[in-house]
Image: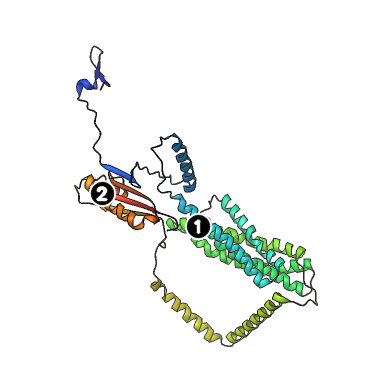
């Protein structure tokens, strides 16, 4: 009332109360927000496009904890929805699968090689390749996310291929009586060109994915680079580290040694498999034309299945966040809209209360997404946001 808004010719001030009627009153309410049945103020924080989701989330969570210490007991701050949590869960899941995949790959190697030390030689390629892949990603400015971790998980089963080929070549030469260093050197050189060509052809498959533009590039770029880095590292490990380990630590059984127990049983099993495979190859070679014709038919039939499978941009994914939008007839009062939204809120809580973590209700005011898109601030719109528990 006593705010100066001007001055007279004699210099005396002109106050607001002298030129206008000033009344103290509250603005008519055009919106309301409830959280778990209690009154609330809703704030949405959006990160910049170049910001890291998890880093922003961690910083905000720390700030929320700091704010709680300065607020009165009757006021609380709750995080309704943290978009970084699904990212954390996905990265954690992919990391776990990556570790389990490495362990299972080593176990399968042991079943076929049947020697613990030989298995360790080849399995050693997994952590070394992953390390150099992570180093390449770091130098390229990539981050650990769902796509890059998925690329590493895919690469785990591929990085041992080169090592198996090199080790098998060395092992066969050792069985033939060559000394350790000669077998390691010549065994590696005899397959070096083959595994290099094989690795390069695999890498070439991912190169077109790097040339995509727009949204597809975002999806495939880091995944492809993670696989490429891991494959290049695995080739280096197979050509350098595995021959060195085999020359230094590979011990061959004596000439008169008899296999016993599980190893003897596995030897008979693999001998039977190899014999059966040899007979199958001989049968196929004698029927080359029919085998090729059958292969072409199967290929064409598989192409014909593509329209039946269907296509979509992304598969449907589970999320623990659900939104319900409500629109009443234009002109409906805030109170009437709130009554309708409250019925929906009560129904949701009664039906799925044990599975619900938090319910946020917004009525009018254009605070919800639906109002922002379909007409701005209107008392006739509402929104019920539901977060269910992770195990629901």
Measuring from the top left, give residue 363's x and y in whole percent: 28, 46
- Up the image or down, 83 lies above or below 41; here it is below
Name which of mark 1 and mark 2 comes first in the sequence.
Answer: 1
Quadrant location of the N terminus in the rendered image: top left
Count of numbered tags: 2
Q: Is residue 367 visible?
A: yes
Pointer 1 local density, CA inside 10 Å: few below 14, some 14–19, many at least 20 = many
Tell me what residue is drawn at x 32 percent, y 45 percent.
34
Residue 141, given in percent of the width and then of the height, sits at 54, 49
Which residue occupies the foreground of this view, 70 or 88? 70
Residue 285 image-quadrant placement: bottom right
Circle 2 sits on which residue? 381
Q: How is the image coloured?
A: rainbow
Q: Nearer the viewer, residue 238 or 315?
A: 315
Residue placed at 56% from the left, 66% from the top? 202
Q: Which residue is mark 1?
A: 147
Q: Secondary structure at mark 1?
A: helix
Q: Which of the numbered marks, if any, corresponds to residue 305?
A: none
- The answer to whether 376 appears left or right of 60 in the picture is left
Seen in the image, is 143 located left or right of residue 340?
right
User: Which mark is in front, 1 or 2?
Assistant: 2
């Amino acid at each position: 009332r006593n705010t100066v808004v001007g001055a007279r010719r004699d210099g005396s001030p002109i106050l607001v109360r002298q030129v206008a009627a000033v009344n103290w009153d509250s603005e008519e309410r055009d919106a309301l927000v409830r959280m778990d049945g209690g009154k609330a103020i809703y704030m949405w924080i959006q990160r910049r496009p170049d910001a890291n989701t998890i880093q922003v989330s961690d910083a905000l969570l720390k700030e929320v904890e700091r704010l709680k210490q300065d607020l009165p007991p009757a006021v609380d701050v709750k995080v309704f929805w943290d978009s970084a949590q699904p990212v954390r869960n996905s990265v954690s899941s992919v990391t776990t699968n990556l570790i389990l995949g490495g362990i299972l790959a080593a176990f399968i190697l042991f079943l076929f090689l049947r020697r613990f030390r030989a298995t360790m030689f080849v399995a050693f390629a997994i952590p070394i390749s992953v390390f150099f892949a992570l180093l390449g990603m770091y130098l390229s400015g990539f981050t650990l996310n769902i796509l890059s971790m998925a690329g590493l998980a895919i690469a785990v089963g591929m990085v041992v291929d080169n090592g198996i080929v090199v080790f098998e070549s060395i092992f066969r030469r050792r069985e033939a009586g060559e000394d350790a260093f000669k077998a390691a050197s010549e065994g590696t050189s005899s397959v070096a060109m083959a595994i290099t060509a094989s690795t390069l052809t695999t890498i070439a498959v991912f190169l077109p994915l790097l040339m995509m533009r727009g949204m597809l590039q975002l999806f495939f770029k880091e995944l492809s680079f993670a696989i490429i880095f891991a494959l290049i590292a695995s080739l280096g490990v197979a050509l350098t580290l595995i021959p060195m380990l085999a020359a230094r630590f590979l011990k061959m059984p004596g000439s008169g040694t008899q296999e016993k127990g599980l190893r003897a049983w596995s030897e008979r099993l693999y001998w039977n498999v190899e014999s059966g495979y040899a007979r199958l190859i001989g049968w196929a070679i004698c029927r080359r034309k029919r085998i090729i014709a059958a292969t072409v038919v199967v290929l064409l039939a598989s192409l014909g299945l593509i329209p039946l499978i269907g296509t979509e941009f992304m598969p449907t994914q589970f999320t623990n966040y659900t939104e319900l939008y409500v629109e009443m007839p234009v002109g409906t009062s805030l109170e009437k809209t709130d009554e309708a939204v409250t019925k929906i809120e009560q129904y949701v809580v009664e039906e799925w209360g044990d599975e619900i973590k938090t319910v946020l209700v917004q009525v009018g005011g254009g605070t919800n997404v639906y109002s922002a898109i379909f007409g701005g601030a209107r008392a006739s719109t509402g929104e019920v946001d539901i977060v269910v528990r992770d195990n629901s």
